[in-house]
Each structure stands twice: as structure tokens, then as C-alpha cells.
Image: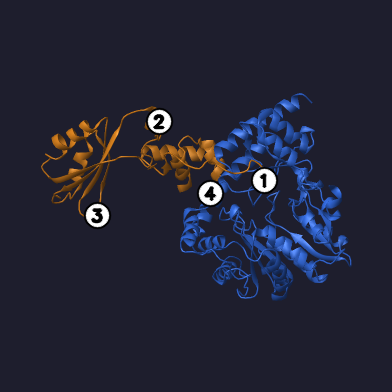
Chain colours: A orange, B blue
């Protein structure tokens, strides 16, 4: 069954009929597995990876290292969930090491990110410190190399 | 100029698809199902091992046999996957791909006039290699009715005093057919009965789907008369590295080594280093690629059958071999028109022998999106062709 999700994770536009052929299962069964996965949030959502640089869109990403104070009973979850509410937060992870939360924030310009950190994130009661690193260039996104070098050099015909 | 060229070479016809290749290269927007190699690039860790070997200065000749370390890994690999054991010191020879391995094998065993039995359709280099080695190829027909599997009753009548060897290759290029252990055991019995060598080209051994590959040498009693050819190209996506191996009895290896040491010296050192890495840490990559091929295989076979090009289920390699008889065209005409009218390249079955006529070889080592689009175009072509019949 995992194979269905592997196929979708690689290409969300693969149709249930195509998947059915690939995994040798009736299409109706594939459809119902996908439907159930959508309902129970096994599939969180379908999205497209866009190379915005190609469209000339200015976009700023920052990796923010956040030290927080864990709370009794809820640990880091309560504060993490709180931080996740901000639309500027693109991804958020609890990490091991010298800080606790790794947050990827997205904004239209540096000012927006700076504003988010100084006005919203840093002042939160349980946040002890933040360290913001602006991302300079994207090389790989969700397993895809952004500007692949080296085209397919296969001969068009070989025996 | 012709009188400068040897009669033997003159007697060999150039690859039947050269013209087709030139035509294909001149066109744009072609989706090619005409390739014979993986679409995957060699896994990064294998490439990295090779570049690092260059940095460390591994740039000299190796033993004529190939690096002992690689042969030891090969011995382990063959034992692990197929349960056959070979002495790394004297029974394994590292070659420049299976292509060289095949050439060494036939040159080492054939006397003028010796015959080699080859299933038809065949991989394109078999007959020329046998002829260049002074032998005579003898063809045994296989057919779609038998899923292109070799039958003892078809081989036996062809055996005579001149017969030296049977050259088999399963999983097969071009048909994708595999032979079961039981079916191969029959061939093994035949080889024993007539004391024939069996050259078993197992380059596609790792690319099997839902079935197990049987290494011919693992069958009871025939290891000593088997020349096992294998390589890295297909399983590890390493076609350009030109590296393969031969495993056989010590005297046979010794004979092949003689030719190898005078003509090739050794396989490229960098490629041997890459081979060691592939054998040590490449299994996950093989599994991933096989899984991906299998998905594409199911898809292409289903679509071919849907669009009126009946296709038996190929259980190995990365080829589908559908019948195009219903279109009324020869395989060459079909391939040429499909290319010109719909910009899809397939290889006419006739390139692989008379028994390939009526079929085309479609390689599914390309993205699913490409396969889908190619099959949509082919469907349009087949419909158009049948309505104009």
C-alpha cells in the first residue's frame, strides 16, 4: 500500500488508474485508499514545487533557530503549535542540539521576516532566544535539484 | 578501398538500424523507446567512489584478471545472489563490459567451422562475434507462442559434430523473456548429453519482476561447462563505464585471459573501483530502480495491449516486445512510419533476427510521462493505420 503513496509523493498528478496498473490493483481500490488517506490526513495536501526565481519573484526565506522554554505536561508542543499559527512560518521542526525549534520562515522581503522575528516571534513569553539565517540560494527543494545541470546525454537509439 | 578490408569483416553486415539512427538523430521532439540502457544516472556514491579513486591516484594498470579486491567482491556477490561459488583468484576475469566477455568467450573456444547455437531473435552482437571468431552461428527459432523461451526439442535437431556451444541470454534483449529454473534445467541436461559449452549472458539478471533469476551455472552438473557473463551496466546503471566479468572454470578463464591480456590488458581502473563500490553498497539502488522499472513495465504492457499491439508479459530486462502484425506492416515499415508520423522511436524486431519480424522492441527505461505520451501517439498511429487499411 505504501507504494501508492510513494508514487503520489513523486508525482501527485498520477491518476488512480495509472497507479492501479503500476501496482497491480483494481482502480476502485486505489481510489478508496487515496480517499481514506485524504480524509485521515495521511495525505496532508497536494502541491507544486515552483521555481519562483524563473518567474522573477522576489522571495526571502530564513532559517530561524529558536530556543524555547519547555512547559510541564506539554513540553515543546504548546509553544511550537503557537508559533506555527503565524502565516510567515513555512515549516517548523523540533530538533536536537544547541537550540530547540528550527523554523523556516517565508516573506516577500527581508523587512517582513525581520518584522516577524522582532515583533512576533522573539517577544513570545516562552521564547528565550532566536538566531536568524537568511537563505541565499536554493539548490535542492523537496528532493528536486532546482537547476539541474547535465542534460540527458543518452543516445536516442542503442541496442 | 574494399580490397584493404578483410573478407571476414566484409561478410558482416553493419547494424541494420544505422540508417534509422541517422533519421532519428535528424528529427526533433522524438520520444525514444529505442534505447538499450537505463535512464538513471549511475548512483552518486558509485560515481563518488570513482572520482575519489582518481584523486588518490589509482591511475595505473591492474592485474590482467582485474583487481583482486573486485574479484573477491564478485565471488561473494555470485554466491550470495545465485548460490554459485567461484575462486576469485583463478575463476573470475574482469572485462570491458559483457561485450568483451562475449568476444573473449567465442574466440577462446571456437575452431574454424565450429557451430554456436543462438536463439532467434538474438542480441545483435552474437552472430557477428561468432563469425569474427571463425565460428558459424546456427539459429534456433523461438516464438511468442512459447513466450520466446528456448525449447530442447527445437535445439536437439540442430546439434551435430560441429556444435561447440549454446549461447543463451535470459532475461532476453530484445524480448524481455525469462526462463524458469525448470526450463533451463532441460537445456542443462541437453548440454551434458552432448557435452556442449553454454555461454550464458546474464547481463539483465537483476532486472526481473515477480520471478527469480536462475543463474545457469547454479544448475546441477553444468558449472564446469558454463561460461557465465555478467556486468554492471544494467543493474547499477553503469553502461558508460564499460565493465563486466566472466566466471568460468580455471582453464577456460586462462584461455580467455590470454586474449584479454594481449588485446585489452585490463579493464579501466577507475571503473573497477566504481564496481567495488557498486557491489559493496549498491543493493538499495538496484532495488529502487527495479521497483521503478516494474511500475513502468506494468503500465506499458497494459497500454500496448489496449491499443491493439498484443504483448506477452515480459518478466525481465526493460523491454516490451509487442506484435505489430495486426497493422499489416513489416516491423521496419512500422518503426519508420511511427517515427516520421508521430515522432516515437521503437526498434524494428527484424533487427534482432527473422523471428523478431512482426514485433517491435519498446524500451521502458524512460520516465512514465514519456511512456504515456509515446503510447498515446502510438495509439493514434495504429488507429490511423488500421482505418486506412
Question: What kind of element bears circle 1?
Answer: loop
Q: Are marks 2 and 3 on the same chain?
A: yes
Q: Does B371 appear above or below B121?
A: above
**Image depth: mark 1 or mark 3 in front:** 1
Which label is found at residue A54? 2
Residue A79 pos. (x, y %): 17, 44
Tag 1 subunit: A
Label 2: few (<14), some (14–19) or many (≥20) C-alpha neighbours in 10 Å: few
Residue placed at 25% from the left, 51% from the top?
A95
Q: Earlier in the sequence, mark 2 or mark 3?
A: 2
**Image depth: mark 4 or mark 3 in front:** 4
Question: What kind of element bears circle 2?
Answer: helix
Left or right: residue B158 versus residue A90 is right
- Considering depth in this image, is B91 or B166 the residue closer to the camera? B91
Q: What whole-number distance in Å separates the C-alpha atoms at marks 2 and 3? A: 35 Å
Q: What whole-number distance in Å separates the C-alpha atoms at marks 1 and 4? A: 16 Å
Label 4: few (<14), some (14–19) or many (≥20) C-alpha neighbours in 10 Å: some
Residue hosting label 3: A96
Residue A97 pos. (x, y %): 23, 55
Which label is found at residue B41? 4
Identify the image quadrant of residue B312: top right
Q: Does B287 appear above or below A56?
A: below
- Considering depth in this image, is B32 or B191 the residue closer to the camera? B32
Contact check, label 4 and label 3, Cβ < 8 Å: no
Residue placed at 54% from the left, 45% from the top?
A23
* Whether residue B187 can be seen here: no
Amino acid at each position: 500500500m505504501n507504494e501508492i503513496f510513494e508514487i503520489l509523493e513523486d508525482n501527485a498528478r498520477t491518476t488512480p488508474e495509472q497507479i492501479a496498473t503500476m501496482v497491480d490493483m483494481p482502480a476502485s481500490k486505489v481510489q478508496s485508499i487515496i480517499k481514506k488517506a485524504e480524509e485521515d490526513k495521511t495525505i496532508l495536501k497536494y502541491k507544486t514545487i515552483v521555481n519562483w526565481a524563473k518567474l522573477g519573484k522576489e522571495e526571502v526565506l530564513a532559517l530561524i533557530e529558536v530556543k524555547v522554554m519547555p512547559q510541564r505536561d506539554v513540553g515543546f508542543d504548546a509553544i511550537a503549535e503557537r508559533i506555527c499559527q503565524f502565516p510567515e512560518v513555512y515549516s517548523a521542526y523540533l530538533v536536537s542540539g544547541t537550540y530547540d525549534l528550527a523554523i523556516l520562515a517565508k516573506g516577500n522581503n527581508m523587512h517582513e521576516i525581520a518584522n516577524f522575528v522582532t515583533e512576533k516571534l522573539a517577544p513570545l513569553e516562552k521564547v528565550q532566544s532566536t538566531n536568524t539565517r537568511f537563505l541565499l540560494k536554493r539548490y535542492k527543494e523537496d528532493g528536486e535539484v532546482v537547476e539541474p545541470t547535465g542534460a540527458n546525454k543518452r543516445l536516442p537509439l542503442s541496442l | 578501398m574494399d580490397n584493404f578490408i578483410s573478407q571476414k569483416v566484409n561478410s558482416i553486415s553493419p547494424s541494420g538500424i544505422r540508417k534509422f539512427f541517422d533519421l532519428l538523430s535528424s528529427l526533433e521532439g522524438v520520444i525514444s523507446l529505442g534505447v538499450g540502457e537505463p535512464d538513471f544516472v549511475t548512483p552518486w556514491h558509485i560515481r563518488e567512489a570513482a572520482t575519489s579513486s582518481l584523486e588518490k591516484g589509482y591511475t595505473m594498470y591492474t592485474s590482467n584478471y582485474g583487481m583482486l579486491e573486485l574479484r573477491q567482491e564478485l565471488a561473494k556477490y555470485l554466491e550470495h545472489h545465485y548460490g554459485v561459488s567461484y575462486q576469485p583468484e583463478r575463476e573470475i576475469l574482469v572485462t570491458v563490459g559483457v561485450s568483451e566477455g562475449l568476444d573473449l568467450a567465442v574466440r577462446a573456444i571456437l575452431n574454424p567451422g565450429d557451430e554456436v547455437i543462438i536463439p532467434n531473435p538474438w542480441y545483435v552482437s552474437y552472430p557477428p562475434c561468432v563469425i569474427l571468431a571463425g565460428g558459424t552461428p546456427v539459429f534456433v527459432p523461438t516464438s511468442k507462442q512459447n513466450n520466446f523461451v528456448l525449447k530442447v526439442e527445437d535445439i536437439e535437431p540442430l546439434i551435430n559434430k560441429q556444435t561447440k556451444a549454446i549461447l543463451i541470454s535470459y532475461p532476453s534483449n530484445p524480448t524481455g523473456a525469462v526462463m524458469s529454473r525448470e526450463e533451463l534445467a532441460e537445456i542443462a541436461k541437453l548440454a551434458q548429453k552432448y557435452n556442449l559449452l553454454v555461454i550464458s549472458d546474464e547481463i539483465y539478471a537483476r532486472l526481473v519482476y515477480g520471478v527469480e533469476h536462475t543463474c545457469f551455472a547454479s544448475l546441477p552438473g553444468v558449472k564446469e561447462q558454463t561460461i557465465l557473463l555478467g556486468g554492471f551496466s544494467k543493474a547499477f546503471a553503469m553502461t558508460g563505464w564499460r565493465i563486466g566479468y566472466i566466471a568460468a572454470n580455471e582453464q577456460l578463464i586462462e584461455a580467455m585471459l590470454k586474449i584479454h591480456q594481449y588485446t585489452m590488458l585490463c579493464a579501466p581502473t577507475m571503473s573497477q573501483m566504481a564496481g567495488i563500490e557498486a557491489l559493496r553498497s549498491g543493493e538499495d539502488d538496484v532495488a529502487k530502480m527495479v521497483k521503478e522499472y516494474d511500475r513502468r513495465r506494468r503500465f506499458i504492457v497494459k497500454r500496448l495491449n489496449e491499443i491493439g499491439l498484443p504483448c506477452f508479459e515480459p518478466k525481465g530486462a526493460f523491454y516490451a516486445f509487442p506484435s505489430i502484425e495486426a497493422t499489416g506492416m513489416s516491423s521496419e515499415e512500422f518503426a519508420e512510419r511511427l517515427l516520421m508520423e508521430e515522432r516515437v522511436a521503437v526498434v524494428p524486431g527484424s533487427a534482432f533476427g527473422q523471428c523478431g519480424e512482426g514485433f517491435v522492441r519498446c524500451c521502458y527505461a524512460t520516465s512514465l510521462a514519456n511512456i504515456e505520451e509515446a503510447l498515446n501517439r502510438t495509439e493514434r498511429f495504429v488507429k490511423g493505420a488500421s482505418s486506412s487499411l
